[in-house]
Each structure stands twice: as structure tokens, then as C-alpha cells.
């Protein structure tokens, strides 16, 4: 598994955290570690999904996600 941290703009409250958590949990190959306002950390399997796909799932909710830290 590889680690991905997403910096997310547009999140403001616990509802946003719930929405992002739900969307990430539904992705195959992704294990959610922590989600808080402005940031999500997951482990993911590169054979199943890319960091771009993971960010896109968050963007589809109306937020703006960008990979942070170690590139994958
Ligand atoms: Cu909110």
C-alpha cells in the first residue's frame, strides 16, 4: 500500500468530513486513515487506483483536492 495525503479546500465542518470520508471509503483499493477539515490521509493500492482518481472522487463532491507530501 502507498500513502497519500490530500490537501482539500472547501471543507468547513463535520458534514464535509463525513462526505469526504464516505466517498473515499467507497473507492476500491483505498483504506481511509484520517479525514479532518482540509485534509485526508489514505493508504491505497496502486494496482487498483491512482492518486489522481482518489483526488477526483473528492473533487466530484465540490471540493478541491491536491496531493501533498510524497508524490505517488
Ligand atoms: Cu461542511
Image (cartoon, rainbow, N blue to C red):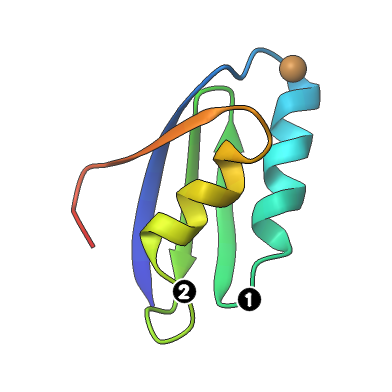
Q: Cβ(mark 1) to ligand 1 < 8 Å?
A: no
Q: Is residue 13 left or right of residue 67?
A: right
Q: Cβ(mark 2) to ligand 1 < 8 Å?
A: no
Q: Is residue 49 above or below residue 26?
A: below
Q: CB of mark 1 within 8 Å of CB of mark 2? A: yes
Residue extending farthest to the left is 70
Q: Quadrant of the N terminus?
A: bottom left
Q: x and y percent of residue 46 in the render?
A: 37, 79
Q: x and y percent of residue 62 in the render?
A: 64, 28
Residue extending farthest to the top is 12
- Sooner in the amino-acid sequence: mark 1 or mark 2: 1
Residue at (48, 83) in percent of width and height:
48
Q: x and y percent of residue 60 in the render?
A: 64, 41
Name the residue that disc number 1 marks: 28
Name the residue that disc number 2 marks: 49
Residue at (78, 36) in percent of width and height:
18
Disc 2 packing (10 Å; few <14; some 14–19; many ≥20): some
Amino acid at each position: 500500500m502507498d500513502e497519500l495525503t490530500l490537501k482539500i479546500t472547501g471543507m468547513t465542518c463535520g458534514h464535509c468530513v463525513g462526505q469526504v470520508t464516505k466517498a473515499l471509503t467507497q473507492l476500491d483499493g483505498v483504506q481511509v486513515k484520517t479525514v479532518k477539515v482540509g485534509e485526508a490521509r489514505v493508504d491505497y493500492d496502486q494496482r487498483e487506483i491512482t492518486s489522481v482518481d482518489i483526488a477526483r472522487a473528492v473533487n466530484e463532491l465540490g471540493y478541491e483536492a491536491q496531493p501533498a507530501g510524497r508524490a505517488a
